[in-house]
Amino acid sequence: MRVDQIMMADDPGGDDSDVGLAVETRPKTKRPPLYKVMILNDDYTPMEFVVMVLERFFGMNHAQSFELMLTVHKKGLAVVGVFSYEIAETKVAQVMDFAQQHQHPLQCTMEKE
Ligand code: TYC
């Protein structure tokens, strides 16, 4: 926090007893770090399942989901969203739980941006 000493202009009392300290209260705000959530390709998870995951947990429409699934299939991985730590962690857990429930080896991870 910056502290700036200021003189009271034209102090009528003249004894300097009310010389003020102006405390700058502008808070030092730091934007929270963001985290990339990624899904990884594998040889076993059905394409339709990955499309469903992207629709269900990342709010994409069918066309967007299909396209991103194909990107992961071809390139090995893709960022599917960028979130605060807590949201990213929740997304990863939701995807991993959902994949496990359906016995697919789909992997979802997060990484600081
Ligand atoms: N490679 C998988 C298949 O051919 C499809 C797939 C795409 C799996 C994306 C995972 O994150 C993934 N069935």
Image: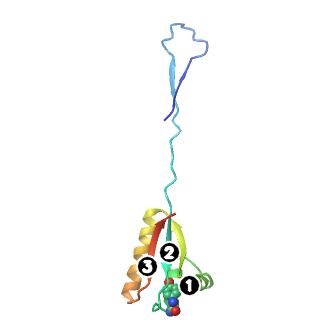
Say if disc 1 is inside 8 Å of ligand 1.
Answer: yes
Type of residue at label 1?
Answer: Met
Helix, strand or loop at label 3? It is helix
Disc on res. 69: 1
- Front residue (pair 93, 108): 108
Q: Residues within 10 Å of mark 2 (few under 14, many from 20)?
A: many
Closest to the observer: 41 or 103?
41
Q: Mark 2 or 1 closer to N-term?
A: 2
Looking at this rendering, what residue extends furthest in the front direction? 75
Going from N to C along the chain, the mark reached first, 2 or 3, is 2
Identify the amino acid type marked 2: Met
**Image position, residue 109 (x, y; %):** 44, 74
Instruction: Measure the C-alpha gap from mark 2 to mark 3.
Output: 11 Å
Q: Is residue 67 left or right of residue 87?
A: right
Name the residue at 38% across, 90% down. 103
In the rendered structure, find residue 95 and report the number of the disc placed on it. 3
What's the residue type where badge 3 is placed? Val
Residue shown at 39% from the left, 74% from the top: 93
Q: Residue at x 44, y 84 (%)?
A: 106
Whether 47 is drawn above or below 3: the answer is below
Residue at x 51% of width, y 16% of height: 19
Q: Which residue is denoted by mark 2 in the rendering?
A: 38
